Image: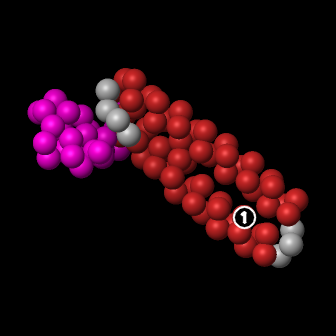
Amino acid sequence: MLLRLWFAGEASQVAAIRHLFTFSGEGIFFIARLLFGLIAPLIFGYMIRETVKLHSTQSATGILYAAVIFVILGEAFSKFIFYFMNLPV
């Protein structure tokens, strides 16, 4: 979605998307959204899988709860970007 707006969007949308990939302003929220909402749950998913292989389901449940918290944080950052920058993320 962002790539389509980057190439075929209006000039204001393209400028806003370029601003997302910087470490200032709303760019920090986009990077946090990627880290907390996408990358961390993938890592935790792998950790859960390996923990279940060891037949330690109680520990896997704790890691699963942490992964859910990361997903909720990522969605909160996504809503911030959507409402304050008017960009679908």
Q: Residue at x 86, y 72 (%)?
A: 55
- Is residue 52 toward the left or the right of residue 38 in the image? right
Count of picture labels: 1
Q: Amino acid at mark 1?
A: Ile
| Quadrant of the image occupied by residue 48 | bottom right
Instruction: Return the residue found at the far bottom.
Output: 54
Residue labelled with disc 1 = 48
Numbered range of the magenta stretch: 1-25
* Residue 86 horizontal/vertical position (percent): 32, 26
Residue 22 among those drawn in magenta: yes
* Residue 22 horizontal/vertical position (percent): 30, 44
Q: Residue at x 79, y 69 (%)?
A: 52
Q: Secondary structure at mark 1?
A: helix
- Is residue 30 toward the left or the right of residue 74 in the image? left
Q: Which quarter of the rendered picture does the N terminus lie within?
A: top left
Instruction: Return the residue found at the far top.
Output: 84
Up the image or down, 53 lies above or below 28; here it is below
